[in-house]
Image (cartoon, grey):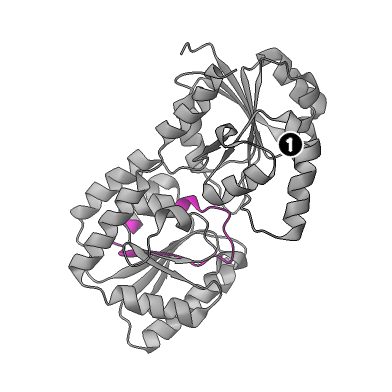
């Protein structure tokens, strides 16, 4: 495919994984990326390749966005959702030969409210999009309800930088892990289940558990963090700084009350971590196989989480190695290259 293909991306908040796929995509197409400012609780320092032109959404009105569209004349426009009126203003000027791709991460929950919203989208919004790109099967189920056919739906919209984390997997083989350590990697906000995690860890220690708990991140609840025995808080880390912490960790815990996907699960799977995930982590539907590479617990249930911590820390070293290998194997199911190939494949279909 020639490099003069052009893709316009109308995005919201950036994440590290997305910069990886965009930079990779820019090796085969010119990319123009409109995005919102970074979240102050995750102040990443992202770098883009020369073939990626970025624009701050906060500086643009609808006419400015239309101006970018007309100037770049893209072959494909990727809309991350349909709630931004400035982005939606492009629908009226899209040409028949320009591909419109919708991305979203809502899962099908079978509620009446969602059924009605899906029907509304099917009747009034569906006509604006040629294809949709979603993270996994739970989102694909909703896309079908919204009027997309099976052939119009791509999965794998969220992917870890698998090559990088595969490297960490190899490096961890030579790391002296010493005593076991749980890892939490995420924002310090209530919906991430951090207080459930810290309460469960307290119970774990009271019951004789010896593993430590390493926590990476920051957020509005930083000042309310639990600092009991065995817990270490590392604060926010840039992506290149994370390995120095995770190289000695044994198992990953993500206790969120709700996670539309959870790319960190994919990342830690690639690293080769056994995992404990709440049943509200949607990426667990792809990357967690119960009793083969980890365990699921009822979101918000501190006792259930504590029991899973006791269970996984009681596994033999060989069993933990087997769990880690299974996680690593599952992580290879989606990669940035697969993501890029999915998007570029659409340019040959219209």
Residue at screen point 46% across, 19% down: 28
Q: Position of residue 247 (x, y in %)?
A: 29, 56
Our reading of the magenta stretch's main secondary structure is loop
Q: Position of residue 348 (x, y in %)?
A: 53, 17
Q: Position of residue 319 (x, y in %)?
A: 22, 67
Magenta highlight on residue 322: no
Please give the residue where the numbered disc 1 appears in the rendered image: 58
Q: Secondary structure at mark 1?
A: helix
Closer to us: 4 or 290: 290
170 relative to 193 in the view: left or right: left
Give the residues drawn in magenta, as a range. Answer: 245-264
179 relative to 192 in the view: left or right: left
Closer to us: 220 or 170: 170
Residue at screen point 51% across, 30% down: 22
Residue at screen point 26% across, 55% down: 325
Residue 61 lies in quadrant: top right
Quick one: label 1, few (<14), some, or many (20+) residues within 10 Å? few
């Amino acid at each position: 495919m020639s490099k003069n293909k052009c893709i316009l991306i109308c995005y919201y908040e950036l994440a590290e994984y997305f910069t990886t796929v965009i930079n990779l995509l820019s090796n085969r197409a010119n990319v123009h990326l409109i995005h919102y400012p970074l979240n102050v609780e995750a102040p990443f320092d992202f770098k883009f390749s020369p073939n990626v032109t970025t624009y701050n959404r906060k500086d643009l009105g609808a006419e400015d966005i239309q101006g970018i569209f007309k100037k770049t004349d893209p072959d494909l426009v990727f809309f991350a959702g349909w709630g931004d009126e400035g982005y939606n203003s492009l629908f009226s000027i899209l040409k028949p030969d320009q591909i419109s791709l919708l991305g979203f991460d809502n899962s099908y929950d079978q509620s009446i409210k969602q059924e009605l919203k899906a029907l509304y989208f099917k009747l009034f919004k569906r006509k604006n999009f040629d294809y949709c790109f979603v993270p996994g099967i739970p989102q694909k189920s909703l896309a079908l309800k919204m009027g997309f056919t099976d052939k119009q739906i791509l999965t794998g919209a969220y992917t870890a930088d698998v090559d990088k984390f595969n490297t960490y997997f190899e490096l961890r083989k030579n790391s002296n892990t010493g005593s076991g350590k749980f890892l939490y990697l995420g924002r310090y906000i209530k919906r991430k289940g951090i207080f459930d995690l810290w309460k469960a860890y307290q119970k774990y220690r009271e019951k004789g558990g010896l593993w430590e708990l390493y926590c990476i991140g920051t957020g509005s609840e930083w000042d309310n963090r639990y600092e009991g025995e065995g817990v270490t808080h590392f604060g926010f880390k840039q992506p290149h700084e994370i390995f120095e912490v995770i190289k000695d960790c044994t198992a990953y815990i993500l206790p969120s009350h709700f996670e539309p996907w959870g790319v960190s699960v994919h990342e830690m799977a690639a690293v080769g971590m056994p995992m404990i995930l709440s049943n509200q982590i949607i990426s667990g539907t792809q990357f967690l196989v119960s009793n083969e590479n980890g365990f699921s617990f009822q979101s918000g249930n501190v006792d259930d989480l504590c029991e899973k911590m006791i269970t996984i820390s009681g596994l033999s070293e060989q069993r933990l190695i087997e769990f880690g290998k299974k996680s690593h194997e599952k992580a290879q199911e989606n990669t940035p290259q697969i993501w890029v190939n999915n998007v570029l494949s659409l340019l040959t279909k219209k």
